[in-house]
Image (cartoon, rainbow, N blue to C red):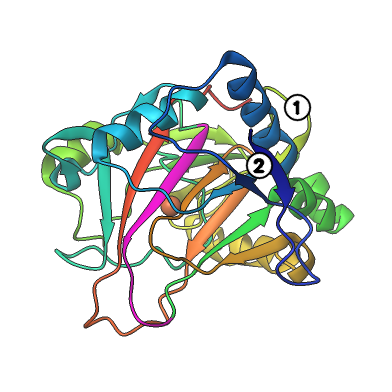
């Protein structure tokens, strides 16, 4: 018997839920799958603690939420299960410290990102999440009007050494996405962009793009619509990318290894 309980670690937490009583290694009944998928829509972030999974068990358990999709850093895929990728502060990969939603350089970015804690530093290295339904609401009316029909052009960051030439050739084509996105299942609108992959905005001088996006984030990110996940080994966290941004807090000793396994799930073309 599973239960879905609101995550309220701090008074400012207003979204997110913990799923209790779930073992991702076990087959799930259709009604459990339906309950969990509805819980993700309702809560944006789901936390499932205490999981002890091989890479295949992780992939197969998460496949109850959608079809796993291949990730673009080929070097970091696990050989025994290539839909699972490593997120690690090693091998030229840096913590993704800026607010973003994953893989926006794809025509159909993933509907959800799922992270599984495998190795953790002694302190720090939290992942922060922000509710972008609320983020959109927090914008000034001028900003809201301005972005109504705005389109970002998304490519791989030119200065990130963790992407290979082959990754770039395949996935860095200036993919267009609306900055205000309608969630395909809830019908609600959310602010949608990746701070470092939105290298251009249609109709805007290139030099103005980053300051403009920074200003939007200043307005959209508040304590009331963010939550901070303090990782424990075995935690699995699922994030609905269509209405949330996330970032890794790089405030940990980089001599220590922080390793998360990641699965992303196929999504729709944003509209
Ligand atoms: Fe990410």
Task: Name the main secondary structure of what is drawn in magenta.
Answer: strand
Residue nearest the observer in this picture, 164 or 63: 63
Please identify the quadrant where the N terminus is shown.
top right
The residue that mark 2 highlights is 243
Number of residues whose C-alpha sits closer than 10 Å to that of mark 2, classed few (under 14), some (14–19) or many (20 or more): many
Read off the magenta span.
111-123
Task: Identify which residue is drawn at 48% across, 70% down.
Answer: 126
Label 2's element? Answer: loop
The residue that mark 1 highlights is 186
State the mark number for residue 71.
none
Q: Is residue 226 above or below residue 26?
A: below
Q: Does the residue labelled 1 lie within 8 Å of ligand 1?
A: no
Q: Does the residue labelled 2 lie within 8 Å of ligand 1?
A: no
Q: In this view, does 55 lie to the left or right of 214?
A: left
Give residue 19's position: percent from left, percent from top: 62, 44
Label 2 close to label 1 by CB (< 8 Å): yes
Task: Identify which residue is drawn at 64% across, 25% down.
Answer: 271
Give residue 176's position: percent from left, percent from top: 49, 32
Give residue 266's position: percent from left, percent from top: 44, 25
Magenta segment includes 117: yes
Magenta segment includes 119: yes
Give residue 2's position: percent from left, percent from top: 64, 36
Farthest residue to the right: give it.
141
């Amino acid at each position: 018997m599973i239960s879905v309980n609101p995550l309220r670690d701090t008074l400012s937490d207003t979204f997110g839920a913990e799923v209790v009583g779930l073992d991702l290694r076990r087959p799930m009944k259709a009604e459990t799958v339906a309950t969990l998928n509805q819980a993700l829509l309702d809560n944006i972030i789901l936390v499932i603690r205490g999981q002890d999974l091989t890479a295949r068990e992780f992939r197969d358990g998460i496949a109850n939420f959608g079809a796993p999709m291949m990730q673009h850093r080929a070097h970091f895929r696990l050989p025994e299960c290539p839909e699972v990728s490593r997120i690690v502060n090693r091998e030229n990969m840096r913590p993704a410290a800026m607010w973003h939603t994953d893989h926006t350089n794809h025509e159909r970015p993933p509907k959800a990102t799922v992270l599984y804690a495998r190795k953790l530093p002694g302190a720090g290295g939290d992942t922060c999440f922000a509710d972008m339904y609320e983020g959109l609401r927090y914008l000034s009316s001028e900003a809201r009007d301005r972005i109504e029909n705005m389109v970002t052009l998304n490519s791989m960051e030119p200065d990130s050494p963790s992407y290979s030439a082959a990754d770039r050739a395949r996935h860095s084509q200036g993919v267009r996405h609306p900055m205000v996105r309608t969630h395909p299942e809830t019908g609600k609108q959310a602010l949608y962009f990746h701070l470092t992959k939105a290298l251009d905005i249609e109709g805007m001088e290139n030099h103005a793009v980053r300051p403009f996006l920074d200003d939007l984030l200043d307005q959209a990110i508040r304590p009331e619509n963010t939550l901070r996940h303090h990782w424990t080994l075995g935690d699995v966290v699922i994030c609905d990318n269509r209405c949330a941004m996330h970032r890794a807090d790089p405030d940990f000793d980089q001599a220590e290894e922080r390793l998360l396994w990641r699965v992303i799930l196929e999504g729709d073309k944003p509209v």
